[in-house]
Image: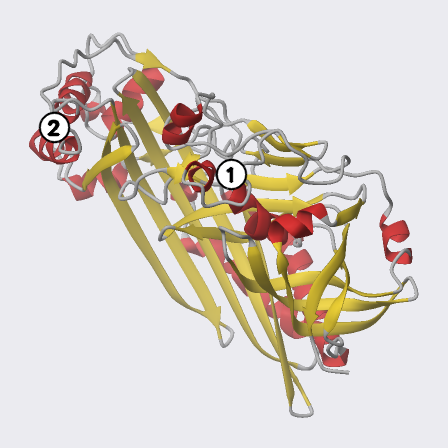
Amino acid sequence: MRYKRREFLKISGISAAGSLIIPPFLNSCKGSALSDRAESYLNHFEITPDQLRKTISAAMAKGGDYADLFFEHTLDNTSALEDGKVNSAYSNISYGVGIRVLKGDQTGYAYSEDLSPEAMIKAASTAANIADNAGGFSPVNVSEFTPPDYYPVKTSWETTSIKDKIPFIQRMNDNIFAGDKRVSKVNVYLSDSSSYILFHNSEGRLTWDYRPMAYIAGVCIMEDKGQIENFFVGRSHRMGAEFLTNELIDELSDEVVKKTSLLFTAGKPKAGEMEVVMGPGESGILLHEAIGHAFEADFNRKNLSIFADKMGKNVAEPFVRIIDDGTLPGRRGSINFDDEGNPSQKTVIVDNGILSSYLHDKISSDYYKVAPTGNGRRQDFRNIPIPRMRCTYMENGPHKREEIIASVKNGVYVDSFSNGEVNIGQGDFTFFVKFGYLIEDGKLTRPIKDFNIIGNGPQALADMVMVADDLIINNGIWTCGKDGQGAPNSMGLPTVKVKKLTVGGINA
């Protein structure tokens, strides 16, 4: 019996233990000599090994150097609370294949939301046009890569109903209102997604992944004597429905009430150049945006990054070590393999102050003649992979937080950010700080809010003169934009002292 595509999407899923449920009618990859796991993903997309071979052959028919197929099936669910009620909930299904052909450093790309053999061959032939010579490609034997599992799922989102989620959303709303009588409005957002990924390339690699993702966020708005303040909190992990706990909800509720309350007493700092202490955790946004993007290999290959000629040279103090890691269990930016089929890894970008690696995709790793770093990432099957960060952080340094603060006579301590702008080429940045403190005579004193910090990323890196031993990996809802694509990220930082940045506050 044949089912319609919509019916297939509705009944396919995973069990609570994380194994695929394959309807009996799809068990059809006979004689393929593939593992059960590989067959289950082929069956999920209703693809046979023969169709993979034919599609790759069509992609390579005009003399491409390399081709790959990226199959994706993602189910998204979002719920929102406003005015004390969960008043919106919607779901979305994304399903299709992206087909890429490389010729030198040029990319041909096409995608299809129709996985029929005819549609895939047509898309492959379109992508093949990046090359213009008759190819002599012969399909190679399939080589399976069984990925690790950095985000095991205990309870799948696909088996979790909206009725199971509402109590947590409502609990956050009730907690926040109960936390302070000045609370006038609360918004709560919950999102979850489950992605099935199947990857195959012209070199024979075949691999697969099941990628969960979830976030919950809350906005607290308070009003006191005509003054209105608001604050946002959120957490995100690659986890199943076990992500939702009363402990998490209570922690976030307490945090957003306390931080919103502090804004009523906060002022603005005086403008000017001064020492800036970056608090642990969320300040990793500076490392990610102002510095991390400049380490991505495409900017360096095209000579757009200020670090393009700095490989092997000193770029920071000798106690600075910067990492991009896709293997941290359950983190938002973690991946079992990148979207080019390369294993995830821990990449040391700056080692004891020396630039030691860029973040590579296939094109850049071939260009630099180095091994891939597992940083080829894409928003979805409709987009090409490009070098992207995963979880970027600075390792602990030799100083203590108290020692760093005590070393500052007049400066600011920054703790929470809301947005920013960066010029990737030269690294000039402006970040908007939502909350922080003045540092006066070595002590945190008055709270401050709503001001900018302005500087240059590479210079700020060189000016990080003290690094504490209190690294925090922040689990916020970080989504990085690049070339029109969004990708989930994590980031972190210990307490760090930058000896000079421009603070945009009030004139003295």
Q: Looking at numbered disc 1 in the image, what kind of residue is underneath it?
A: Ala
Please name the residue shown 35% across and 28% down the image: 20
Query: Which residue sits at x=19%, y=39%?
Result: 110
Query: Which secondary structure, mark 2?
Result: loop
**Which residue position is annotated with label 1?**
308
Residue, far front: 309
Closer to the chain start, of discs 2 and 1, is 2
Answer left or right for 29 relative to 375. Answer: left
Query: Which type of secondary structure does the marked residue at label 1 adopt?
Result: loop
Q: Place residue 221 in its image quadrant.
A: bottom right
Q: Which x, y percent locates residue 261?
A: 72, 75
In the image, taking residue 415 as reference, residue 90 lies left or right, namely: left
Residue lying at 18% horizontally and 42% vertically, measured from the top left: 113
Q: Is residue 451 visible?
A: yes
Q: Is residue 255 left or right of residue 440?
A: left
Q: Please name the amino acid that badge 2 sits on.
A: Asp
> How far across and down, in percent of the image, does residue 330 sit?
56, 37
Is 174 rendered above or below residue 102?
Answer: below
Residue 156 versus residue 70: which sits nearer the camera? 70
- In the rendered view, would you say 81 is above or below 202? below
Q: Is 231 drawn above or below residue 313 in the view shown? A: below
Question: Which quadrant holds residue 372?
Answer: top left
Question: Dividing the picture into quarters, in which one does residue 124 lie?
Answer: top left
Q: Nearer the viewer, mark 2 or mark 1?
A: 1
Which disc is residue 132 wearing?
A: 2
Label 1 Cα neighbours within 10 Å, binned few <14 / some 14-19 / many ≥20: some
* Percent coordinates x, y for residue 250 in the rendering: 67, 58
